[in-house]
Image (spheres, rainbow, N blue to C red):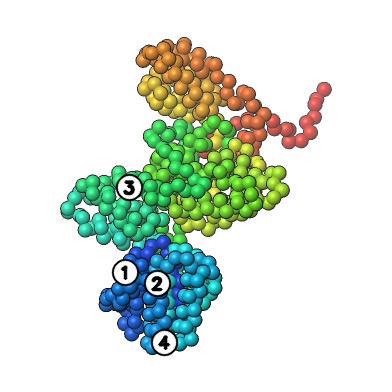
Amino acid sequence: MSDYAETMRSIKQYLSARVPLIVVKSQERSRVKEMMKEIAASLRVMPFYGYSRTEGLFQIQPYSVIADDASLQTAIDQARNQFKSVDNVNFVFEDIDDIASDTPTARELAATVLLAEQHHQGCIILMTDKPVWSGLSMLGMLAELDLPNTEEILVEIAGIINMHQGIIPISWSPEEVHQAAEILTGVSLIQAVNIVTTLIAKGQVTSDDISELSKYKDRIIGSLAGIERVKVSSKNQVGGLRNLRKWLDTREELMRADLSASAVRPPRGILLCGVPGCGKSLSAKAIAHRWKLPLYRLDMSAVLGMYVGQSEAQFKEALEAADKVAPCILWVDEIEKALSGSNDSTGVQRRIIGQFLYWLQESTSKVFMVATANDVRSLPPELLRKGRFDEVFFVDLPEADERAEILRMYFTRYLDFDLPPDLQDDLVEMTEGFSGSDIDASVNDIAITMLATHTTTVPGDTQIKQFFANVVPYSRTNPEDLMDIREWGASRAVPAGVHKQRPTESASPAGRQVVFL
């Protein structure tokens, strides 16, 4: 059952029980008004009246104006008179201000509700998107109409698409229409209609327009607490990491599929740990570009506040914002800095970890998290348990064939230059122990030098090799740290790339070894 149908069922049940006050909370006034018209039409034995500042007092079904005076006091007085003389009469109030606290308006409405209760035959229905004073709300029941779910948006936009088929070229398949509905989940129904009709107004609708929906949605939702949109492009590619790329290929279809009738939950996300500079952060951008989904970065430094309770509230708000913009990729860089829990005497980080774990476990929105960590040993063990992230991948230094792929990728990107096989083989050998970022920096230096000298001619082989010879990679400056990182990843994570078995330099003998003299 859709949320709209469920909310209507609840309101009808309250009306049948003659509850004297029904508070209907929703951000979509137009949908609630439409619902009240449907309810009034189906319950003709009950008179329904409505009030708004623009229309004054009117009968809902059939529509007719009751009083020219549009004041709230006139509507309340009319309600009181009707409650005393007419059975089962209902008054629907909208545009009522100043009822969030103990005010004269809130008290007068409360007195009117008590009068309806006294005569056992009246009901006041308040439409609002704001809090209601407890002294008033405690007299009745609450019904909430959330923003439309995917099913409701699908029905609406499918109708619009079908209406324009044959009038303009529309190439969306049923699967793409469903994908569009998923993207637009989180906005109001009228906003979803506005976005789709804006696309139609271009004169054609193509598969490329699917990615445009997220941009329109961003403009509507605006600034989101704790998360920021990150631009991605075709340049966001990662070399190597074949195991990771193969694993992602199997999950891409799940992010696009309609899982509403399935017990299968959407992919939750991955944790990428390992050697610095080997493509962990870049992978988040590459996944977003490959899957054609928007990328948002969860800024933990912005979330963590200085006051007690502030951090938890802001973190919860950030996760709720991510659910609103789903389907999307949510990137958390260096997650260990926020969730390590070390030196935390306030308990804030433990509570944030609890919120995070609950969201990972219970959220059903299509938010695919890509979290990266350099020092994964400082993360709480419960975060690494199976069932939190879909998988934990270890990103190591690239092997020879992966370095060849990375070299070709960066020489093409920066220099538009196809590496000759002999030079590629020499550079692959020279870059043993290099990370992807080391290779990136070396080729970028060549491009900078060419720009600075105003030349478009790529340097010779000897000069190119010199740029790589000048680099001292992380594997040489921090060999002990590299060994510790690899030791952790060898037994606790899945290799992101296809790696050969490495010798364990630090391994101790299995037992005492006899020395023969």
Picture mark count:
4
As drawn, the label of residue 55 is 1
| C-alpha gap between disc 3 and disc 1 | 39 Å
Q: Secondary structure at mark 4?
A: helix
- Which of the labelled discs sits on residue 210, or is there none? 3
Can you tell which of label 4 and label 2 is closer to the viewer?
A: 2
| Of pointers 2 and 1, the one earlier in the residue sequence | 1
330 is higher (above) or lower (below) than 85: above
Residue 429: percent from the left, percent from the top?
51, 20
Of pointers 2 and 3, the one earlier in the residue sequence? 2
- Image quadrant in which you'd find residue 423: top left
The residue labelled by disc 4 is: 84
Residue that extends furthest to the left in the rendered view of this protein: 167
**Image depth: mark 2 or mark 3 in front:** 2
Instruction: Answer with left or right where residue 275 lies relative to residue 67.
Output: right
Residue type at mark 3 is Ile
